[in-house]
Structure formats: C-alpha cells, structure tokens
C-alpha cells in the first residue's frame, strides 16, 4: 500500500483553498469538486431555422454524393453553395455543421 501525503489545509480563504485542491487534483489525475466555468454560448444564429425536405432522382443523388466525397464536404454544403451562387441570401452560419458527423468519427 502506498502512503498518501496529506495536503496542509491551513488557509482560511475558501477561494485559495479551492484553487489548491483543484491544482492537487490535476497533478494527481483525480477528479475535483471545483466547478469548471461553463462553456461559452454558441454564436447567435441568423434567425429561426426550418427544414426543407426534397426528393431527387437517383442520378442526381449519386452525382451529389460523388461530388461531396471528392470535395470532402457534405451534400448540404454543395446545395447551400449552389443557392448562394444563384443569388439567394445564404449566410455563413448556414454552413455550420450540427456535429452529427463528428460523433463516432476517428477525428478527435
């Protein structure tokens, strides 16, 4: 059995004590009870989003699939780019991914 060295806890200041506990936990690789700051909020969207569902022919679907794979983008990206190129008001925020492609991927 290994002997654990006790941490001296003689400070009266709670903030200093909490910081020392967090540092000791990080050094030892153990969880800490010190709360982490909340993540920053996501950027505000350009407005309400609504889905559009379309059906396309097999040849068009396959062409979009091949083009997306070659360019390493999504079919959604291709369609939004085409709409923007045609003069429709497509914002940069419309191109942001929702994270589904990243789940379970090998890129971490």
Image (cartoon, rainbow, N blue to C red):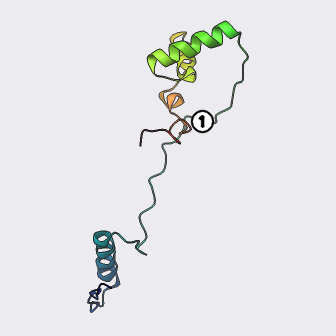
Q: Identify the residue position indicated by label 1 in the image.
A: 47
Q: Residues within 10 Å of mark 1 (few under 14, many from 20)?
A: few
Q: Is residue 74 above or below residue 3?
A: above
Residue 100's spot in the image, x, y percent? 56, 38
Residue at the far front in the pictured view: 1
> Is residue 41 found left or right of 25 in the rendered image?
right
The residue that appears at 51% across and 11% down in the rendered structure is 85
Residue 57's spot in the image, x, y percent? 71, 9
> Is residue 47 found left or right of 81 in the rendered image?
right
The residue that appears at 40% across and 73% down in the rendered structure is 32
Q: How many marks?
A: 1
Res. 16 image quadrant: bottom left
Quadrant of the image containing the N terminus? bottom left
Res. 6 image quadrant: bottom left
Residue 42's spot in the image, x, y percent? 49, 46
Q: Nearer the viewer, residue 75 or 106?
A: 106
């Amino acid at each position: 059995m290994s002997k654990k060295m006790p941490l001296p806890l003689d400070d009266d200041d709670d903030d200093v004590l909490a910081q020392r506990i967090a540092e000791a936990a990080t050094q030892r690789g153990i969880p800490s009870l010190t709360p982490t700051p909340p993540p920053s909020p996501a950027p505000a969207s350009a407005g309400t989003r609504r889905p559009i569902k379309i059906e396309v022919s097999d040849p068009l679907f396959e062409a979009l699939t091949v083009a997306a794979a070659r360019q390493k983008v999504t079919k959604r990206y291709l369609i939004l780019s085409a709409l923007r190129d045609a003069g429709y008001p497509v914002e940069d925020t419309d191109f942001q991914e929702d994270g589904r492609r990243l789940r379970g991927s090998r890129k971490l």
